[in-house]
Image (tube, helix red, strand yellow):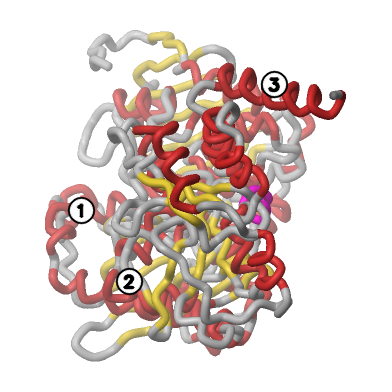
Amino acid sequence: MTVNTDTSAVSQPFQAEVAELLHLMVHSVYSETDIFLRELISNASDACDKLRYEAIAAPDLIADGAPPKIRIAPDKKAGTLSVIDSGIGMDRQELIDNLGTIARSGTKSFLSRLTEAKDGAGLIGQFGVGFYSAFMVADRIVVTSRRAGTDQVWTWSSSGGSGFEIAPASEEDASRIARGTEIVLHLKQDAAKYLETYEIERIVRAYSDNIQFPIELKPEDGEPRQINSASALWQRSKSELTAEDYTQAYRAIAGAFDDPAMTLHYRAEGRQSYAVLLFAPSTKPFDLFEPSRKGKVKLYVRRVFIADDADLLPGYLRFIRGVIDSEDLPLNISREMLQNNPQLAQIRKAVTGRVIGELETLGEKEPEAFAKIWDAFGPVIKEGIWEDFERREKLLALSRFTTTAGERRSLKQYAESLKPNQTEVYYLVGDSLDRLKSNPKLESASARGIEVLLLTDPVDAFWTSAPLDFGGKPLKSLSQGDVDFGLIPLLDEHADDKNKENSGTDEAATIAVIKDTLGERVSDVRASQRLTTSASCLVAGGNARDRQLERLLAQQNKGAGAKPILEINMRHPLVAAIAGNKDAAADLSFLLLEQAQILDGELPEDPAAFANRLNQLVLRGLSKTEG
């Protein structure tokens, strides 16, 4: 948007998403309206952080020597609550950009979830739209701001309708604000409680006590007094802190309302010195699967905020929230320097190892707490099995799986239940747990009591394509290559004899008929070692991609996939009928292929032809029965 240099007041419409958001804020009643003050204080803290950072390169920005702070001033007579900071401030264009638009890719998702949620308070902080939560308690908001180092002061105002007005500040307002931003909320009648000093103190203690800058309360009849501890909690000793302290710090840092499922707090000393305070949430943040896969760990240098997207952890740990505060990095480090800084790379490696180690310990000692993390973030952690070769073994051991033997099973537990002569860890990838449990490829394994990993997350199709083993046992897909369970005994020792008794079909002749009928639709037809009761299934060749990965890539138009192999159960009556019924052989061959496709969750190539063929076969059967 072009900057308008006209000094007169100008009215502008809100971005469409902002207008919709404000409508929800104004017309909805949430149980936790306290969030508005937490969000305004958080924004004020960010402004103070930015001032300290920019002042490293431009010390004149804080030439007055006054440290940044935040002040809250209630005015019962006027019915207003003011939140004032002496941070970086905003110029005219920044007011328009920051308060008139939402420059985030998750806006649509947020609006959708806010509309559906019974209580949207827990979502607001996650989506970077906290300023607008003030309209839950105010029917008019006036923002006056002076950017540090400039002379111009601007006023932004809105009543939460379709737009806002922006104009130069009056002389009185301009003289009141030397630097930073003043937000004046004209409170609704039912929000008058927020003018009470005890209410303000309660909210600050609950949500903002660990904000690093002093938060002063200016009562109507008295001197300002600080109402928060204003300490960098991560710099304090663990022995000084309680579980409640950590919970409050997590909620303030992450903008969340849940409790942390894991807390990691320590100080590293030696070649580098830095403090670490990290949390694993117990619920999913909205942006977990954004394409950018940006982390949310904040980087500080000697208590000065530097960046909140410095890639301090790998993408597969992007759900971790918290702070890393270095004593050694230069304060004037640029974002470009962050990408290639060797000190930061060492911190990243060490902290990543520590987080994974903490998750391992949690999994062993507190399985219920670990289960919360895995249920929420398991698919994300599994991205690391594909991406992080160095830690692949640890991440495999950390992972939990639904298997044919139960839920949240580790590979260590799987290894303990291996059958005699079993030399591989078997898995099956699909898009539905119910469909996998009924997949015919499980039949021979089930007959021997072999445990199979049932993998349904989209990422499973990718990480399983890497050459993997656990404890010397390679991972093997039941949808790919040859499978031979011949050395593993059946649970029912007489089952094999029964199957052999029923098998009298000419294998070579039957396969030749099916191959000739199906032609290029399959790459091969062969007798199956996987099937015991079903007639057919589709598998990939030993050097081809797994069937589920082929399907996912085909959906993304990544080119034509390899033709599957049709495996047939030579003991099944339908297969036996092919050799003995030349008239129906073609229809039966197609039926073997099409029912295998359906069991894999695919549609037959020609659904109409499939339906017609099936009808004809049924009618033939009925006519023989009637005859």
Is 16 contained in the magenta span? no
Q: Is residue 97 visible?
A: yes
Q: In the rendered image, which residue does mark 1 sit on? A: 55
Q: Percent x, y for residue 450?
A: 61, 74
Tell me the crowding category of disc 1: few under 14, some 14 to 19, or many 20 or more residues within 10 angstroms, Cα based. Answer: some
- Residue 562 located left or right of residue 344: right
- Point out the image quarter for the C terminus: top right
- Mark closer to the chain start, 3 or 1: 1
Q: Nearer the viewer, residue 90 or 486?
A: 486
Mark in the foreground, 3 or 1: 3
Mark in the foreground, 1 or 2: 2
Q: Identify the residue at horizontal 21%, vertical 70% (top origin).
A: 344
Query: Alpha-carbon distance for marks 3 and 1?
Result: 79 Å
- Residue 396 located left or right of residue 389: right
Above or below: residue 619 compared with residue 13: below
Q: Nearer the viewer, residue 517 or 188?
A: 517
Q: Is residue 283 visible?
A: no
- Point out the image quarter for the N terminus: top left
Above or below: residue 158 compared with residue 403: above
Q: Identify the residue at horizontal 59%, vertical 24% (top origin).
A: 610
Q: Which residues are magenta?
A: 434-438
Above or below: residue 305 compared with residue 143: below
Q: Residue 290's quadrant in the figure?
A: top left
Q: In the rendered image, which residue does mark 3 sit on? A: 615
